[in-house]
Each structure stands twice: as C-alpha cells, then as structure tokens.
Amino acid sequence: MSNQLHLQQFQQQIAESISSNTFLKISLGNYQGNEKELKNVYARRVKIKRTDMLSFTYRYKTRDIIKNLPIPEGIRLVANFISNDFKVCTLFTTLKEVILEHSKKQLISVRENIVKAAVQPTLSHNKEKKRIIQPTGKTYLQELKISDAEGNVFKNAQDKYRQINQYVEILSALIKELPAGKINSVVDMGSGKGYLTFALYDYLHNVLKLDTKVTGVEYREDLVTLCNGIAGNSGFDKLDFVPGTIENYAVESIDLLIALHACDTATDDAIYKGIMANAGLIVVAPCCHKQIRREMEKNKAKNELAFLTRHGIFMERQAEMVTDGIRALILEYCGYKTKVFEFISDAHTPKNVLVVGIKTTGPGQADKAQEEKRAEIKQKIAESKAYFGIGYHHLERILGLDKQV
C-alpha cells in the first residue's frame, strides 16, 4: 500500500472516530522539523462557544502554545504534519489505538492496538475543577444571576462563582478544626447581596447535613429584603437576613462569625462581637485600615522604617500589616489560635488577606502559663503601638484592653 493511501485511510479513521464520538486525542512525535525547541504536538476535541473544534497543543522545551481549529481544518493539519515533520502519529479512541510511523526509508506503516478498558471522551475546553457548590438546581444562584435555570454559569459570573467556591473551600477546612457538631449558629456580618451566605448555608445543610442557623447582617434594607425573598424561594428556612450595623448587632451564642470586607473599624467591631459571643471560629477579610493609618500619619514615629513610610503607598501597606498584626495579637490574647494568610480567589480579582481565629480556651480556663503568655502579648501590643506612633487600636479600645493594668 502506498504512503498516500495510508495517509488517506488514517485521515478517514480520525474523521470517523470524531463522528462516532469515540475520538480521544492525537499525539504527534519524533519531530524532524526546523523548530529546534518543538518536541510534540497533541490534539484533542473541544467545544468552544457550542462549536466542535480540535485544540492543538504545541509543546516546546520551555512553553506550550495552543491553537484551536475547526475539525476539517484540524484533520488536514494532522495530515500535513505526518506527511512532513512528524514521523510518528498515534490516534487514541475509546476502542483502539492507531499508530502511523515512518520507517528509515520513509515508508509509512500503520498498526492498531485494541483498547481493553474504554475511556469516555470529554468535550470540555478546560479541565473542570470539581466545585463544592454545584450550580445545577440552585434557586439562589439563578436569582443572584450566577446561573441559568439549567445550571449553566453565566460567562460574566464565572469569577463570582469561583470566588464563592473558594471561600467555601477555605471555610470547610477551618470548620474541620472545630469539634464535631458545634456549628449550630453562623453570623455573616456585612453580608451584602449574600453570595457567600447562601453558598455557606447550602454547604452546611446539603453537604455536611447540619441543622445550622445562619444569619446575615446588612445595613442596606433593600438587600435584606431581596435576600430574605431569595432564601424563602430557595426553601432555606434556617437562613435569615436582618437589617442593622455590625456595631449595633446584639450577639448571643455564635459558633462561626464571618465578616468579609467590612470597612476599617467595622472589622474590629465584628471581631469584638465574635469574642463577646465566645465564637469558636472567627474569619474576617479586612479592608481600608484607615484608623491606624491616621494614627501613624499624625504621630510620624521616627524608626528604621521611616524611609519607607514617608511614601504614601508604603505607609498604606504598612498600616494594613500593622492593623491586622495587632488584630491577630488581640485574638491570641483572648484565647484564639490565629492564622493570617493571603489568597487570590481568581486571576481577575484582587488579593485578599484573611485573619482567622480558632478558639482554644474558654472563659476562665487560662492557667498560669497562659496568663504569662497573655502578659507577653499585651507587652508586644504596647511596644508595637509605641514603635509605629499609634495612640490606640480600635479593637483594643472597645475590648477595654488599653485600660487594663
């Protein structure tokens, strides 16, 4: 059989495997062309904007380049590759592998291997990460304009969908550090439109199967009305939203307190409420940090960092770190193990810092060693304030720690 006939039959097998939905991928190797760093080319079938295409990955020594082509054009490109620069091409299907090779005498041969275990083809453009919050059948995601009735996430809501999933993933790991069955009450302070509040309720009730009461606190009454309506339509009977500020919210017993992007001292108010309610877990994502920055700018402390803080942008960043650093110290003073970490919820969203407090001691449980540690922490807070020229820290003041001897 001639080389040309082998090539035609190989192209036909590619086309038939695609039309019968048995096509998996194509691998091109033993490159003999002029691009020195090109090693291999791989092709797989994808669906882009509801159109079937072949996605080619050009694997170079230090990078990959991806090109997507209509299927007929992609098949012709494969034929061109194996006619010229690539000496081996393997077609993978759910039923068999078809290997085309050039011999040293440039004669083409084709052989087939039967596949024992069938693999199902996928048309996903990117490998989808398994999300904790799935969009199918979620009324709240539909009403929040995240997905349509069929569970398809809208293109302009992809970032928000990934963001709420990452928040839930982070919270799920933190919740595991608490005693089993202790998530009876959750308060989300500054809940806004409720994206995370709804997703967390969904996770607690439908994944963890807990009977947790969840409350969103939001000062904008139109959002409170909207979210209560969505909660009712979703059948979330243990979720409610209440109007009011973080500062004025009356706390009782809270197992988990959340405050995401509460501006400036509102984050301190939220932490204070969590401490007063003896919350097992406090999670805040602060923003603004204006109070400490004003203190630092007013007093202009002379220290080794003065050469940085004379620049506004560095002053702002320093104020952020100092504010959250003292918050972490105060949480430790109040019997919490702390974590402070940065995360990026998506390539198109800003970086965030999470300050996390996990309760380790209850009221009156501190022993002598812990009391000594508390004294050391208090001394560290005082030294830090003096070093940066800070007259007071809002969280320290509302807890009354600045008045204790």
Image: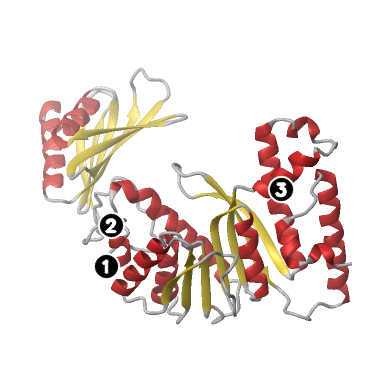
The foreground one among 291 and 148 is: 291
> Do the CB atoms of the residues marked 3 and 1 lie less than 8 Å apart?
no
Tell me the SS state at disc 2: loop
Instruction: Kindly state the secondary structure of the residue where label 1 is placed.
Output: loop
Q: Secondary structure at mark 3?
A: helix
Q: Quadrant location of residue 196? A: bottom left
Q: Nearer the viewer, residue 86 or 65?
A: 65
Vertically, is 26 above or below 340?
above
In 3D space, how far apart are the residues under numbered discs 2 and 3 (Cα atoms)?
41 Å
Q: Give the residue at x 52% y 61%.
A: 170
Mark 1–mark 2 Cα distance, whole angstroms, equals 10 Å
Name which of mark 3 and mark 1 comes first in the sequence: 1
Q: In the visual, does 39 lie left or right of 149?
A: right
The residue lying at 51 percent from left, 61 percent from top is 190
Q: Position of residue 396 (x, y in %)?
A: 75, 61
The amino acid type, in three-letter code, at marker 3 is: Ile
Please give the name of the residue rendered at 24% of the width and 56% of the height, measured from the top-left corner. Answer: 120
Pointer 2 or 3: first along the chain = 2
Closer to the camera: disc 2 or disc 3? 3
Q: Which residue is mark 2?
A: 147
Residue 35's tag is: none
Quadrant placement of the C terminus: bottom right
| Front residue (pair 198, 340) | 198
Mark 3 to mark 1 CA distance (whole Å): 45 Å
- The relative height of residue 101 versus residue 398 in the rendered view (above or below) is above
At label 3, counting other C-alpha atoms closer than 10 Å, the crowd grade (few under 14, some 14-19, many 20 or more) is many
For disc 3, the marked residue is 292
Circle 1 sits on which residue?
Answer: 137
Q: In the rendered structure, which amino acid carries the disc numbered 1?
A: Gly
Instruction: Give the image location of residue 109, x and y in percent.
Output: 20, 34
208 versus 87 height, above or below: below
